[in-house]
Image (spheres, grey):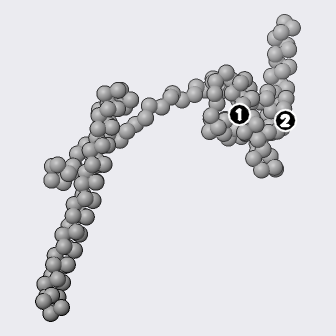
Amino acid sequence: MSDINLKKIREMREKFHQEANSIKSQIQLLQTQLIQCKERVRVYEELLVGEMTSPGDMTPDTTDPFHSGHVVKRSSLFVSRSTRTTKAEMSRRKNILVSILQEQGSMQPRDLLPLASEAIGTEVESHHLRAILRRFDEIFEAKEEHGVWGLTEFGQSLHSMEDSEDSESNSA
């Protein structure tokens, strides 16, 4: 047992411990570089496919590991959005919701959504329905029961005024 030099073993252990820590930090750096490279490839693929708005939308926000810490311009990945709903379309959707709530009474949005989608003729997303209900707060109101929406008194009178105008125009 006296042949074993404990000091030498401790030195070797420390040396390999430092080497292991060095390798760990190198691996972390390489993983970061790999993620950045994959992101660049994805951005370039999107540019080639045409999913991005334009190359002019490049913003500096990434450090380039290949150019000694210089900042590289990278896309902020704008997803193409559909156009805003026009005022006339919002009004049409409002009138459809008024007629549905007039016929069915107060409802929860999850029950109103399929009826609205069917009446409007396109798939209405829940946040679109919520936007209509909240935008026209003089017509729609959240009722006492949690999550239930209905017509205000003005909304009910508005619907009956539209019905009387329609009957007058049909009889003329």
Q: Is residue 31 above or below residue 14?
A: above
Q: Quadrant of the C terminus?
A: top right
Residue 86 visible at all:
yes
Residue at figure coordinates x 20%, y 78% from the top left: 13
State left or right for residue 14 relative to residue 100: left
Residue at figure coordinates x 15%, y 53% from the top left: 68
Q: Secondary structure at mark 1?
A: helix
Residues 72 and 152: in front is: 72
Residues 161 and 14: in front is: 14
Residue at figure coordinates x 18%, y 54% from the top left: 69
**Percent of width and height locating residue 65:** 20, 51
Q: Residues within 10 Å of mark 2 (few under 14, many from 20)?
A: few
Q: Residues within 10 Å of mark 1 (few under 14, many from 20)?
A: many
The amino acid on which the numbered mark 2 sits, given as a three-letter code, is Gly
Point out the residue furthest to the bottom here. Answer: 2
Q: Which residue is mark 2?
A: 105
Point out the residue furthest to the top here. Answer: 172
Residue 94: quadrant of the picture: top right
Q: Which residue is mark 1?
A: 113
The amino acid on which the numbered mark 1 sits, given as a three-letter code, is Leu
**Percent of width and height locating residue 90:** 64, 28
Q: CA distance from mark 1 to mark 2?
A: 14 Å
- Labels 1, 2: front one: 1
Q: Earlier in the sequence, mark 1 or mark 2?
A: 2
Q: Is residue 42 above or below residue 60?
A: above
State left or right for residue 11 relative to residue 74: left
Q: Secondary structure at mark 2?
A: loop
**Percent of width and height locating residue 87:** 61, 26
